[in-house]
Image (cartoon, helix red, strand yellow):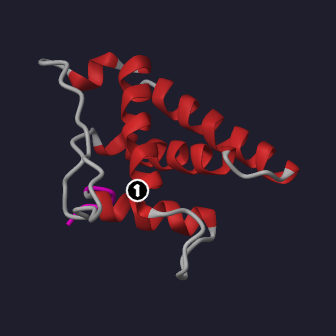
Amino acid sequence: MPALETVGQYLEEARTLLQDELPPYRYDDKSLVRNLNTAILEARRLRADLFLPAFEIPYVDTPELIDREIVVPIDPMYRPALVYYICGRAQLRDDEATTDARSGAFLTKFAAQMLTVQS
């Protein structure tokens, strides 16, 4: 299975970067999946061409039990950017001065990677 293809893979990668790998988790799955959904919306805003031809915006439902096998349909080249967004949003809700800079770095990296055009 390719890297960062399923919701579960996004959650695992985000938890690694957030240093939140052992239960009880600081960031619950539901909030990280909401961040993933927002990342997809932001990706659509920055790079609508990635969602052609139908401009359909994928969405991951957040019921009580997250289906970690749902495939997130986005070009593999931009998948790491979504992880940076997930982490940046998660860190935004922390109340520590050090996380503000870290959050900004994650969100800036997301935007930079989304706006990089490969030839």
Q: Residues within 10 Å of mark 1 (few under 14, many from 20)?
A: some
Q: Nearer the viewer, residue 72 or 81?
A: 72
Up/down of 26 relative to 4, above or below: below
Q: Nearer the viewer, residue 11 or 84?
A: 11
Left or right for 114, reference 25: left
By secondary structure, the bulk of the magenta-drawn segment is best described as loop
Q: Position of residue 18 (x, y in %)?
A: 61, 63
At x 79% / y 51%, what residue is drawn?
95
Quarter occupied by the N terminus: bottom left
Furthest toward the right, the residue is: 97
Left or right for 10, reference 98: left
Callout 1 amino acid = Lys
The stretch drawn in magenta includes residue 115: no
Q: Is residue 61 visible?
A: yes
Element type at marker 1?
Answer: helix
Q: Position of residue 72 (x, y in %)?
A: 24, 47
Quarter of the image where one finds residue 26: bottom right
Up/down of 99 relative to 3, above or below: above
- How many numbered markers are drawn? 1
At x 87% / y 49%, what residue is drawn?
97
Furthest toward the left, the residue is: 54
User: What residue did someone put label 1 on?
Assistant: 30
Quarter of the image where one finds residue 45: top left
Quarter occupied by the C terminus: top left
At x 38% / y 46%, what residue is drawn?
79
- Per the rendered image, the range of residues in magenta is 1-5
Left or right for 51, reference 105: left
Q: Nearer the viewer, residue 27 or 9?
A: 27
